[in-house]
Image: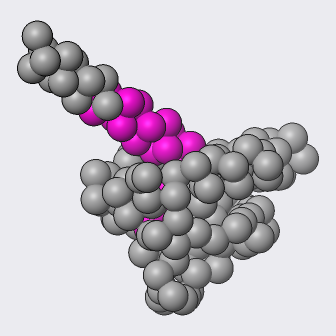
Amino acid sequence: MKKVADILIHKGSKITSVTADTTVLEALKIMADQNIGSVMVMDGSRYLGIMTERDYSRKVILKGKSSTATRVSEIMSDNLPRVSPSDSIEFCMQIMSDKNIRYLPVFDNHLLTGIISINDLVRETILTQQETISHLKDYLHSSM
């Protein structure tokens, strides 16, 4: 059974972060430059929350706020469930489905070690299925 650690091995555990005082516009520019949908909000090495594209659309755009005047701390999500590297992909998919969320911060003890997205989970699931198909094909060809 594949684990969160397997995803982090493939994608790396690079964390893009901003401070709580960063403007939403600055955070969006960072996200656009790196082609990512979220940034972690940190105070030094302490995790405060996450700002996602969904936070922006629902808490800034739909409420008529200014991206240049609004701070990340005003719109970030700080109540996401946390997962560990030893949690299974199935467990993470269940959490994301139950909570209708797209990102999960990964913690090893109390240290933030990465972030996984629903896309990461789907990508890893497809990779696992491709490996299974390949093994089955090899088995069938070797028994002929």
| Residue beneath the point at 43% across and 59% down | 3
Quadrant of the rendered structure where residue 132 is? top left
Asked if the magenta segment contains residue 44, the reply would be no
Q: How many marks?
A: 0
Residue 96 picture location, percent across and down: 69, 49
Residue sitting at the far right? 63
Q: Answer left or right for 69 relative to 38.
A: right
Please say whether residue 21 is visible from this viewpoint: no
Residue 109 picture location, percent across and down: 51, 88
Dominant SS of magenta comes to: helix
Return the residue nearer the eye: 21 or 56: 56
Return the residue nearer the eye: 14 or 128: 128
Residue 105 picture location, percent across and down: 56, 67
Residue 22 picture location, percent across and down: 59, 70
Quadrant of the rendered structure where residue 128 is? top left
**Magenta stretch bounds:** 114-131
Residue sitting at the far top? 144
Q: Answer left or right for 38 relative to 134.
A: right
| Residue beneath the point at 73% across and 71% down | 78
Residue 109 vs 85, above or below: the answer is below
Quarter in which the C terminus is drawn: top left
Say how the picture is coloured. Answer: one colour
Please say whether residue 12 is visible from this viewpoint: yes
| Residue beneath the point at 69% across and 49% down | 94
Residue 61 vs 49, above or below: the answer is above
